Structures are given as structure tokens and as C-alpha cells.
Amino acid sequence: MKVKENEDLKQFAPLVDAIAETFGSSCEVVLHDLRTLDRAIIKIANGHITGRQVGAPITDMGLRLFEEEKINQKDTAVVGYRTKTKDGRELKSTTVFIRDKKGKTVGCLCINIDLTPYLAAKNLVDQVCRIVNMNKIDAENESLEKFVSDVDSLMDQLIEKAVKDVNKPIAAMSKEDKLQVMRNLKKSGFYLIKGSIKRLSREWGVSMPTIYKYLEEI
């Protein structure tokens, strides 16, 4: 289904190519429509860096930042956090959320710089390569952003991480364990994804009303 073009996002489209051309082929620039998280990317330049293209979903980190932004409603950008590609290349990333005229967050502009060429000449470009630590993001090795090309893979990794934190197989979980898993999923932004409730009910072998009941409890 084609999503109606958002005028608030359309005006940022020229920036995608402008920023990418300014910083070169090592700089990926992505424009996301946060109304359609399962196919959030509506424009991308230098997508070879993470292997994504138009129609790919938002990342796990993007979901987390969106969830936090909804709660905190801060206007400041998230600048210079550390991410990695599937093949282990280190990126320096920045996310700027975009609001419409009513103040609602409708999208975000993300910049991912592949530091590989800069790290090779680190002594000359030390300032460019400096990574800004984010307490919550860098505290856990598992929290580095993972780039995916389809929404099913995104939900898989979010569920896997939420279950791993509880450290029990689903069959051995108590109700409180499952509630903790659901709290972890809430924090990650999992429920912002269309079809997430249905996916979780299928994963656990319980009805959707049961999942909704658990959601009410947390």
C-alpha cells in the first residue's frame, strides 16, 4: 500500500543527497517515515554501507530512540553514537527527529559515517573519529545497532534479546518472567511495529487477548 506523501518529510529529501555528496561515499544518509515503521526508509543515499534500500524497516536502535523520544519529547538530536555494520565496520551515527506543524514526530534523518578510511589515518583526523559515548547504549555490548532489510528479522532480533535478558526458555518462564520480557520489548519499541502483537502471540503459542492482558499489567 502506497503511503500518502508527507509534506513535512518531503522538504528534507534534498538534504539526503546534499549531505551524502558533501561527505562522500563513506557517508550513508537515510530519511525515515515513522508512520510506517515496517518500511520506514523513503530515501537513502550510499545504502551500500549498511546494505539497505528504500522500503527497509527502521532499525532496533531507531525504534528505541523513537520510543524514548515519545516519552521525553526532546528537540535535541542524538549525535555521534557508535554502531556497527554486519561485517564489523564501525560507524559514527546521528539521528535527528522531524516534527510536523502540530509538534508530532513524523520522521527522522539519520547519518551513518563509515569510519574505516578515517581510522586508517586516525592521527590526522582524530577529531572526526572521536566517538561520543551514550551511557545506556555503550553500557551493553549487545546494544549496538543492527541493520536489517525486512521487518520479520527486526522483530526476531528484538524478541531474541528480550528473552535472552530473562535467561530462560519460553517453556520454563513463569508469568512474571513473561511480563519482564514484555517490559523489555516495550522499552525497545517493539509494540510500535505493525503486527507485533500477533507475532508475539504466535511466538508464545497464546491468544492475542492474552498478550493484550499482559500489556495492561505492565
Image (cartoon, helix red, strand yellow):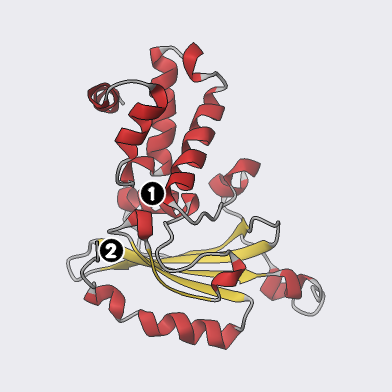
Tell me, yes or no, if residue 114 can be seen here: yes
Distance between mark 1 and mark 2 Cα atoms = 14 Å
Q: Quadrant of the C terminus?
A: top left
67 with respect to 20 (left or right): left
Name of the residue lying farthest toward the left: 102
Q: In the image, is residue 101 above or below residue 65?
A: below
User: Measured from the top left, where is residue 112 in percent x and y?
Assistant: 56, 68
Q: Quadrant of the N terminus?
A: bottom left
Q: In the image, is residue 177 above or below residue 152?
A: above
User: Measured from the top left, where is residue 179 in percent x and y?
Assistant: 38, 22
Residue sitting at x 70%, y 61%:
89
User: Measured from the top left, where is residue 45 in percent x and y?
Assistant: 50, 77
Residue sitting at x 38%, y 44%:
189
207 with respect to 183 (left or right): left
Name of the residue lying farthest toward the front: 1
Residue sitting at x 54%, y 19%:
169
Q: Amino acid at mark 2?
A: Val
Residue placed under numbered mark 2 in the picture: 106
Q: Secondary structure at mark 1?
A: helix
- Front one among 69 and 111: 111
Q: Residues within 10 Å of mark 1 (few under 14, many from 20)?
A: some
Q: Residues within 10 Å of mark 2 (few under 14, many from 20)?
A: some
Q: Secondary structure at mark 2?
A: strand
C-beta proximity under 8 Å, tags 1 and 2: no
- Which image quadrant is residue 213 in? top left
Q: Amino acid at mark 1?
A: Glu
User: Measured from the top left, where is residue 7 in percent x and y?
Assistant: 23, 77
Residue sitting at x 41%, y 39%:
187
- Which image quadrant is residue 98 in? bottom left
- Which image quadrant is residue 210 in? top left
> Sequence order check: which comes first, mark 1 or mark 2?
1
Which numbered tag is attached to residue 68?
Answer: 1
